[in-house]
Image: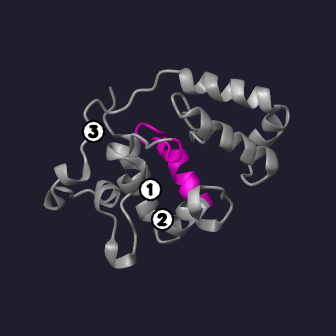
Amino acid sequence: MANLAPSIAGMPASYLAAQLEHFKSGTRNNAIMKPMAMMLDDAGIKATSEWFASLPVALPANPAFRGEKQPQDLTELGEKLAYLGDWERDLPSCVACHGPEGVGVGETFPHLAGQHADYIESQLKAWQDGARSGDSNGLMGHVAKKLTAEEMTAVANYFANVETK
């Protein structure tokens, strides 16, 4: 069975609140989440977001930064795209925004490390076909449109299998 629901424990509260607002407004469409978000007022969104943000999350203990992984050592497609991207196609590395090993960066870029592969892949497809929007500067739509189906699967599997604490 596919894991199409994200693991949101430990995500920044402001990121989670923004996603709930996106579901509520229809910027982000999901048949399960829209009615749930519609039931929440501002206080409910704040309380829900803060509660999920307070939950512990397992992330890599010592994430490898971009320069710490040598390009010649990156042989798996998912890890190669995650760390190097493909500059011939103007495709940035995932870790340029989502941090080393996909641990997340600030309030805008959620962690990918340990996320379900099915979920990551489904979201990349949603960004690619325009079914999902509302991200910072519309970056993900542009990135996802450059990925092949094989690359989406590879990147999703890489982040799903990053060693976490």
| Residue 47 picture location, percent across and down | 70, 23
Q: Tell me how far mark 3 sits from mark 1, CA to CA.
A: 22 Å
Helix, strand or loop under label 3: loop
* The label number, if any, that marks residue 153 in the structure image: 1
Helix, strand or loop under label 1: helix
* The label number, if any, that marks residue 14 in the structure image: none
Magenta residue check for 154: no
Outermost residue, bottom side:
88
Write the residue at 33% across / 70% down: 86
| Residue 104 picture location, percent across and down | 43, 42
Q: Is the residue 35 above or below the residue 138 in the image? A: above
Write the residue at 74% across / 43% down: 21
Q: Tell me how far mark 2 sits from mark 3, CA to CA.
A: 27 Å
Q: Is the residue 162 above or below the residue 41 in the image? A: below
User: Is 87 left or right of 108, judged from the image as shown?
Assistant: left
> Mark 1 and mark 2 in contact (Cβ < 8 Å)?
yes
Magenta residue check for 113: yes
- Looking at the picture, tell me which residue is in the foreground, 2 or 141: 141
The colour style of the image is one colour
Which callout, 2 or 3, points at the residue further toward the start of the chain?
3
Given the image, on which type of amino acid does mark 1 rest? Thr
| Residue 152 picture location, percent across and down | 46, 59
Q: Quadrant of the C terminus?
A: top left
**Start-end of magenta stretch:** 107-126
Q: Residue 140 appears in which quarter of the rendering? A: bottom right
- Residue at mark 3: 63
Given the image, on which type of amino acid does mark 2 rest? Ala
